[in-house]
Amino acid sequence: MGLTRTRVRVEGIVQGVGFRPFVHALAGRLGLAGLVGNDAGGVFVEVEGAAETVERFLEALAAEAPPLAVIERVTATPLAPTGAAGFAIAPSLAGGDRQTLVSPDTATCADCLRELADPADRRFRYPFINCTNCGPRFTIVRDVPYDRPATTMAGFEMCADCAREYRDPADRRFHAQPVCCPACGPSLRLLDRAGRSTGGDPLAGAAARLRDGAVVAVKGLGGYHLAADAGSEPAVAALRTRKHREDKPFAVMVADLDGARRLCEVGPAEEAMLASPRRPIVLLRRRAAGSGAAAGVATSVAPGNRSLGVMLPYTPLHQLLLEAVGRPIVLTSGNVSDEPIAYQDPEALDRLGGIADWFLVHDRPIHVRADDSVVRAFGGRELPLRRSRGFAPQPLGLPWPFPRHVLACGAELKHTFCLAKGGHAFLSHHIGDLENYETFRSFTEGVEHFRRLFDVDPRVVAHDLHPEYLSTKYALELDGVEHEGVQHHHAHVAACLADNGEAGPVIGVAFDGLGFGTDGTIWGGELLVADLEGFRRAGHLEQVPMPGGAAAIKEPWRMAAAWLDAAFGPSVPEHLPVMDRPRDRWEQVVALGRSGTAAPVTSSAGRLFDAVAAILGVRDAVNYEGQAAVELEQLADPGEAAAYPARVAPADDNLLRLGGTDLVRAVVADLLAGAPPPLIAARFHNGLAAATVAACDALREETGLGTVALSGGVFQNMLLLERTAAGLQANGIRVLTHSRVPPNDAGISLGQAAVAGARDRSRPVSADPWQGVPHQQVDDPGTTERGLQ
Ligand SMILES: [Zn+2]
Ligand SMILES: [Zn+2]
């Protein structure tokens, strides 16, 4: 049998994931000669041996790849055999066009957990244990190629034992860049508020203080958290007061799946999400109070909420801390109210000094701030609400090539940005609300970091149409690029299309808080006929003024005034309680709405939820965006099937109108008749869902389109999402929802990128769409994402 030699190139997430030792071991097992190495394009391999053995090698390469590897393409080229024996690991080659992908941070693997618990292991109880299959990645990478000097581990010189593991191709830690041990790696300290070290074991000290009711700041993977005993009402209440966070639910970390089950209902989909290497916060339905199982979590963890955000430990530090505390802890972002999470040491001590009693810190710097991701299950799939730590910067595979590199600047709230090239969209980690200098700086620095990591040089810059968004201003100040304005709700629908790897056209339903419309009004309850390239507004929720503009977002009772005025005119039933609470200002605000000054007109669905929440007495003012709508959903009785009727008909401009005033009149009638608010809230949800379904039916009739994409922040409301999707499906309509990016404004940048790419592809003078990128096989959308699950 003749010898063959084959050169193999492997692209995807193949560096820093143990690929070379895997190849080395595989070649050794099959008795093949050759070499393996990293370069800027990924991993290159040369194997020499019998033709059928080389064939087996190629099959096993994809089938048995290490858990964190995401293989996007394997190409094989024949070479002349050299007759050389043995299999070597070649030195890394620098330079060239960077195509390698940086892996997300990954939860501690089973092998490391076993060593962590083994008294005979030299990393027994070492809070920074990691290997090629797990540990910090994105948050410690400063530059590419991904090598120790380009990470925040650069300052830790490996001891002889670690260096041996690092150099041994047969070792699980071969070229694991963050490899370390108690002798050479980072260490913990427990500090008081003044920054003075306490004596004793820092972990045991922190755990004891948590059990005593203290608030402890814990430096984690992507930033500082604030921790407190989740079962202690005084501890959680103190954390709330000091953090100036009145109502927004806190997330809880439990030791394991059983711990999660003690607090919440955990189905198979939830279990998979909780235990996945991404370890997001998973929103779970709480067990009914009184079942005895709800014990262990103080009321003020998630006041009035049927759900609880739960996560499992994802670093060895969290693992050890949870074991030592022995019960669930609140683990919430280390910040004051809406500031970005603290991640740099002196700054954290300074900013969190008024909140935390103690600081559990370590000396491994965090290069990129990464908040915990938040997901929930919908229809057996993952529905992301915040896609950050554990997900970013893993690219989203898209089935269409971007002709030129794209930067999409996103919107404003829950901000993300997105870079795109080839068939990849690199959606950023969660940046936050782009309303202050610090988040804006995170955005601009993040763009530069991503450009360097993924070697993207944007020629097309996409942005929202809102002229006052900082992201729009940033985009328009960039010179020498082509600008592409993308309407906010078109971007939502495009994000949903891209999420599903589809190009449309579809009927798009985009319900959210606010977005700048093409007619200068504020949109937010939109029915679009859209594909990736363009859209036509086909209908929307009835419009009302927002009396006082931005003030109406913070004070839902103002939206109640506007909607009641629209529904009843001067003959509003006198004795509605909502009108009593701001009695001295009610008439004034109604008049402000009618005046047309300082009262921009909106078709926002989010603002209609606010109005109904205020009418039902849920709340007059909010402490965080969307709070009234969230609480209205919590109030609604999910067992109620009745729906308020709402007209759906074309107006003078031929666009469909969804009759929000009908819904408001029905709410008021039921309220005056003494119906319980949970039933009214449910009938309102059901009525809006039914009106949406009717509108989609009418648009299907008109356009022949049988698919509806549901997007926008209002579709984080599970009751509305479930009722709308079920109604559409019952009518034989295909429904697209989100599973890779959030339906809220965090998904906007992906939508903008997808629109910019589609418009670029359709340009008549478009060059070769694959120019500048290696011709790669187009992957099934979602393949790269699913690779880790
Ligand atoms: Zn590991
Ligand atoms: Zn060491």
Image (cartoon, grey):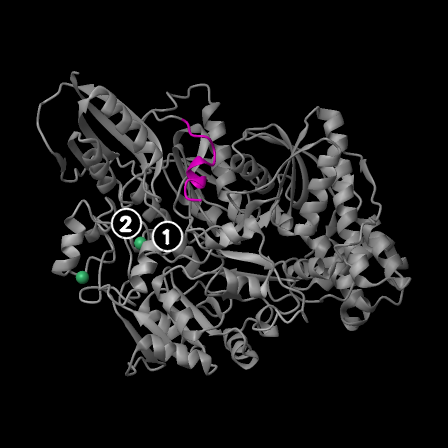
Within the image, what quadrant is residue 10 found in? top left
Label 2: element kind: loop
Task: Name the residue nearer the viewer: 259 or 707.
Answer: 259
Q: Residue at x 38, y 46 (%)?
A: 393
CA neighbours of label 2 inside 10 A, class few (<14), some (14 to 19), many (20+): many
**In terms of sequence position, does the residue under pointer 1 or pointer 2 come before the other?**
1
Q: Tell me the kind of residue under disc 1.
A: Thr
- Residue to which mark 2 is pinned: 132
State the residue lying farthest toward the top.
2
First to last magenta residue range: 778-789
- Residue to which mark 1 is pinned: 106
User: In the rendered view, does 128 fall on the left or right side of 416?
Assistant: left
Label 1: element kind: loop
Q: Residue at x 8, y 27 (%)?
A: 84
Residue 163, percent from left and from top:
14, 55
For ligand 1, tell me if the residue under mark 2 lies within 8 Å.
yes
Is 123 located above or below residue 19 in the figure?
Answer: below
Residue 708, percent from left and from top:
66, 34
